[in-house]
Image (cartoon, rainbow, N blue to C red):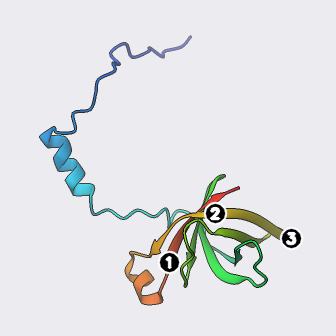
Amino acid sequence: MSHYKPNSKLSNNQVDWSDPHLESLLRKTESWKLDNRGGFPAQEVHIQIGWGAHSGRPAVLVWETDQVMVLETRFTIPQGEHVRVDRLYGDGMRTVWGMVAEGREGFREEDRQNGVYVHWLHVR
């Protein structure tokens, strides 16, 4: 026997973006700078930038899903650039290709001290 009762009070109400309570809440969150780091065990990786790259550069994989990787580097990578990410996986190497969707300087104090850039890659 199921105790689930569908909520019959759901409606297609529109959000009133000018509501003072909502505006106040949104103002409180304007300065938040979320970057998906901290909930994933960081992993050292090597990346190759561009299709014809011949040498890898160090980076840190700080977050990952099936379609997105977030990397920390000590250098910038242009938006739209193709990136090959090589990392140790078990007893071998795993290679993934992605494209830089966004990149910026890190916001955290330790990022600024260490010259860290954060890049979001769309994985192929």
Q: Which residue is mark 1?
A: 117
Relative to residue 3, is residue 7 drawn left or right? left
The quarter of the picture where residue 14 lies is top left
Q: Earlier in the sequence, mark 3 or mark 2?
A: 3
Q: Kindly tell me whether residue 50 is visible in this rendering.
A: yes
The quarter of the picture where residue 96 lies is bottom right
**Image coordinates for residue 107, horizontal then vertical, percent:** 39, 75
Q: Secondary structure at mark 2?
A: strand
Q: Which residue is mark 2?
A: 99
What crowding class fits label 1: few (fewer than 14 Cα within 10 Å), some (14-19), or many (20 or more)? many
Q: Which residue is mark 3?
A: 92
Q: Kindly tell me whether residue 42 is visible in this rendering.
A: no
Q: Say which residue appears at 63% left-offset and 79% top-offset.
A: 59
Give me the C-alpha separation between circle 3 and circle 2: 23 Å
Quadrant that contains the N terminus: top right
Q: Say which residue appears at 20% left-offset and 54% top-offset.
A: 27
Identify the amino acid type marked 1. Answer: Tyr
Relative to residue 22, is residue 88 drawn left or right? right
Identify the amino acid type marked 3. Answer: Gly
Circle 1/circle 3 CB separation < 8 Å:
no
Question: Height in image: 94 above or below 23?
Answer: below
**Image coordinates for residue 44, horizontal then vertical, percent:** 67, 78
Q: Say which residue appears at 73% left-offset and 82% top-offset.
A: 56
Q: Say which residue appears at 39% left-offset and 17% top-offset.
A: 7
What crowding class fits label 2: few (fewer than 14 Cα within 10 Å), some (14-19), or many (20 or more)? many
Identify the amino acid type marked 2. Answer: Met
